[in-house]
Amino acid sequence: MANVVVVGAQWGDEGKGKIVDWLSERADIVARFQGGHNAGHTLVVGGQVYKLSLLPSGIVRGKLSVIGNGVVLDPWALLEEIARLEGQGVRITPDNLMIAENTPLILPLHGELDRARESSTAVAKIGTTGRGIGPAYEDKVGRRSIRVADLFDPATVVQRIERLLTHHNALRRGLGLPEVDGEALRAQLQEIAPKLRPYAAPVWKLLNEARRAGKRILFEGAQGSLLDVDFGTYPFVTSSTTLAGQAATGTGVGPSAVGFVLGIVKAYTTRVGEGPFAAELHDDIGEHLRTVGHERGTVTGRNRRCGWFDAVLVRQTCALSGVNGIALTKMDVLDGLPELKICVAYDLDGERLDHLPTAADAQARCKPIYETVEGWTGSTAGARSWAELPAQAIKYVRRIEELIQCPVALVSTSPEREDTILVTDPFSD
């Protein structure tokens, strides 16, 4: 059976939650492989709205949901999210939720450090969510993380805390923050350990056994490819690898387990936070996209910056993740606009570029080169077949395919999961 990896092919907020929810009906397992509770996925099921940050989207459908080792986990945020969803009638037990034992934890000190850095006037703001994601990943690669499995051995916890605070208390003194009390932190972890223990499992083993049994795995990415720590608009990026390749290392399966790569792409472009955005609009059209598209961050609540579709960026991210097909979302937001523009190249100091340059200063100087296409007066909202789309909307989709050099596999025409046009089934062999 084919497995499917879902990744955002822009700056996040592309509508991955709805697409993963739609695909999860035919998946056996849904696995998160990177990021933390800085992610925000909104599902609309039968009029009920579910907002997820850490939990895989499949949990709403009762699918076996897995949090992989590539995620950084705030255990207190996880338990709050579980309680909130259970209050909405979602059943969550160790039978349908498992957490990799080698998943590193986000601790309160990580969020404090994140916010202290972001509020400092000494350095430029990155635009983080302030939830400790970056500092937690720093500790992971610095080999001082406390991981899920460590919680269940009191002696190990004490050793890990000592090593962790040797580093963090020195940082905190430099930032004018009070030092962390190691005993208080140990008590916090001791209190939460039994609540996490039922969910802890050797996820790599579970997934490999599932593969051999012919189970279908849906790997759910968070954020977007342009926030990738290596290939995004650095330094205005997240602290994890957001490309499809991370699905393997972030869950403990080999690269051969990754089957169809589905890139989620909004029919226009948005981003939250700081950083370059060549196709950004500061006019009435930009405000129209923000208003009609309800462009506010699920996690941050911040208004998203909006602009025309940038084919240069999506072509680049599709290549980086080896995308086999895209799911085009939010087509209905463009309904009624008399003309649309697509960014087809950049002007960098008089030179035409067909890719986003690596250097931050060059990225900031890129000016969009647009192609203008005719809009449509009919509605795409709720369409479930090509026949229900206006002719110009179909032409817009076909032109996007040509420019990004990747076919459209799905078209989403509303937040409701049924309002989806299937072109290619990602789960087909």
Image (tube, rainbow, N blue to C red):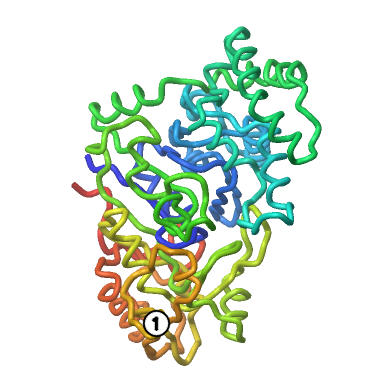
Residue assigned mark 1: 347
Q: For the point 51% across and 54% down, which residue is it?
A: 237
Looking at the image, residue 293 sits to the left or right of residue 387; the answer is right
Q: For the point 29% across and 75% down, which residue is it?
A: 403
**Amino acid type of the residue that numbered disc 1 sits on in the rendered structure:** Asp
Quarter that holds the N terminus: top left
Q: Nearer the viewer, residue 175 or 51?
A: 175
Residue 422 to residue 149: above or below: below
Residue 370: which quarter of the image?
Answer: bottom left
For label 1, the crowd category at 10 Å Cα-Cα, with few meaning under 14, some 14 to 19 and many 20 or more, is: some
Residue 1 to residue 7: above or below: above
Q: For the point 70% across and 30% down, which residue is it?
A: 170
Residue 8: which quarter of the image?
Answer: bottom left
Q: Is mark 1 on a helix, strand or loop?
A: strand
Looking at the image, residue 79 sits to the left or right of residue 418; the answer is right
Q: Where is residue 325 in the image (x, y as percent from the top left)?
A: 28, 60
